[in-house]
Image (cartoon, rainbow, N blue to C red):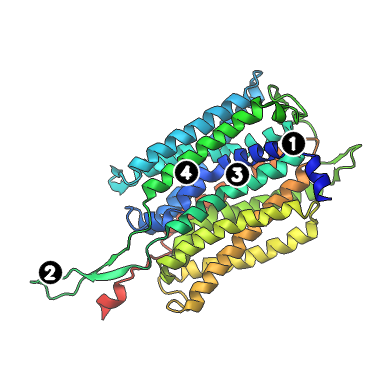
Amino acid sequence: MLSQKLSNRRLVVDLLALMFGLGAWIGVNGIYVQLPLLVNSSPEGWSLPAHMVMLVQFANLGPILYTLYIKYSTWACDKYITYALLIAAVISTFILAFVYHKTSIVFGNEHSTALLCLMFVIAIVGCTSSVLFMPYMRNYREIYLVSYLVGEGLSGFVPSTVALIQGVGGNPECQNVTKPESTMLEFVPYYPEPRFSSKIFFIFLGTLLFLCYLSFLGLNNLSVALGELVKHPGSMETLPTDTRAPPSYKTNSGWTMSKQVYLYLLIMMAVVCFLGNGTLPSIQSYSCLPYGNVAYHLTVTLSSMAGPLAMCLGFVIQTPKVNLLTGLTAILLVLSGFICFLAAKSPTPPLQYSWIGEFIVVISWILINGLIGFIKLAITTLFRPDPGRGLYYAGVATQIGSLIGAIITFILVNNAKIFDSYSPCSMITQH
C-alpha cells in the first residue's frame, strides 16, 4: 500500500512543497526560540514576548493589503508577490544576525528597535502566508497540500532543534557585586554562554529561508512540478474566486458540509489561534522563567517541536471527526487555563523550586502546542476539498483570533500589570 501511495506522487514535488511551507513561519518561529537568550539582555525584559506577539499581529497589514488587492485588481501576480516576500524575509534575517542587539530610545523608553523592526518584516511573510501561500497550493494536486502543511509545521521544529543544540548555558548564577564601601549586599544574575551565539543562529535561519525561496522557484519552473499542476498559477484561481458562494456545499465529488458546522469550525480555528498565536506566547516567559532558564529553554524548544509532530498525524488521520476536535479543544482550554494560572502566580508559582514543577510546566506546554498543531491541521484538512473559499476563510479566522488574543494580552502584560517578573537573585538579597 505504501508503494502504491508513493507511485501516485512525485517525491521531488513533496520536498519542494515542504520547503515552501517551511518558509512561511520559520523566520518568526526562529526568533521566538531565541527568546530564552534575548529576554535577559533586552530592555523590554520579560515583556519582550508580548511586544513580539503584538508586532506579529500588526503584520496582518500584509494579508489585509493582499485581500484588497485580489478584490480590486485584475492583474494576477500571486507568484511574484510570493517571490518578493520570501526575498524580503531572507534579507531581513541576514541583517538581523548583525544588529539584533541594537537598541534606541522611543517615546522616552529604550527598546530593541532593530530586532522588532526586522521581525515586523519577517512576520508579514508569515501572516500573509495564511491567505497566499497555503491557497496557492490549490494549483497543485491536493496530495501536496499535506506536504506543505507539514513543512509549515517544521518551521517550528527545525529552529527548535537547532536551539536545543545551542542551549542556554544553564540557569543563572548570582554574583556578588557589592561595593567595598557599601553595607548592602548586592547580587546580579550571570547567564552562562550558549554553545553558539544568536548571530550564528540567525545566519543559519537566513540560509534556510534562501533554500525555501529556491524551492518555490523550483515549484514554478521544474518540469516535474509543472506536471503536477491542476490549474495555472498565473490566474486569480490560486484562490477559488466564487466570492458569492455560500458556506454550504454539496458537490459531485461527495464533499458536503452544513453551514452550522462550517461556521463552528471557523470559530474553533479562531479560538485555537487566539490561544496559540496571541495569548499564550505573550505570557510564556511569566509561566516558565520562575522555574529557571533551563525550564524556559526546554519549554520553548520542545513545545515548538510538538506542533509539527502532531501535524504529521495528518498523513494517518485523513478525515478527522468534528466531535474529536471538540473534545481536544476542551482539553486545550483546560491546559491553557492552567498556564494562565501559573503566569498570574509569577514570581512565586506552585512547586517553584522542585523538579516536579519544572516537569509539569514543560509537559503542559508540549501538550498545548501539540493539540494546537493537530486541531489546526484537522480543520484545514476538512476544508481542503471545499470548492469555494474554505481555505481562505480558515486563514482569515486564524488572523482574527490571533489579533484579538495579542491585543488583550498585550494590555494585560504592559498596562494592567497582572504578571510580575522574577529575579533569580532576589531571595539571596532578602536574606
Chain-order first, disc 2 or disc 1:
2
Q: Which residue is mark 2?
A: 179
Secondary structure of the residue carrying numbered label 4: helix
Which residue is most to the left? Answer: 181
- Residue at 66% x, 45% y is 149
Tell me the number on the disc at residue 389: 1
The kind of residue tagged 1 is Arg
Point out residue 137 in the picture as x, y percentages from the top left corner. Answer: 70, 35
The kind of residue tagged 2 is Lys
What distance separates the C-alpha of mark 2 from that of mark 3? 52 Å
Viewer-nearest of discs 2 and 1: 2
Instruction: Tell which of 365 and 346 is nearer to you.
Output: 365
Pointer 1 local density, CA inside 10 Å: few below 14, some 14–19, many at least 20: many
The kind of residue tagged 3 is Gln
Tell me the number on the disc at residue 263: none
Q: Are circles 2 and 4 on residues that touch, CB within 8 Å?
A: no
Pointer 2 local density, CA inside 10 Å: few below 14, some 14–19, many at least 20: few
The kind of residue tagged 4 is Leu
Q: Which residue is mark 3?
A: 399
Q: How many marks?
A: 4
Chain-order first, disc 3 or disc 1:
1
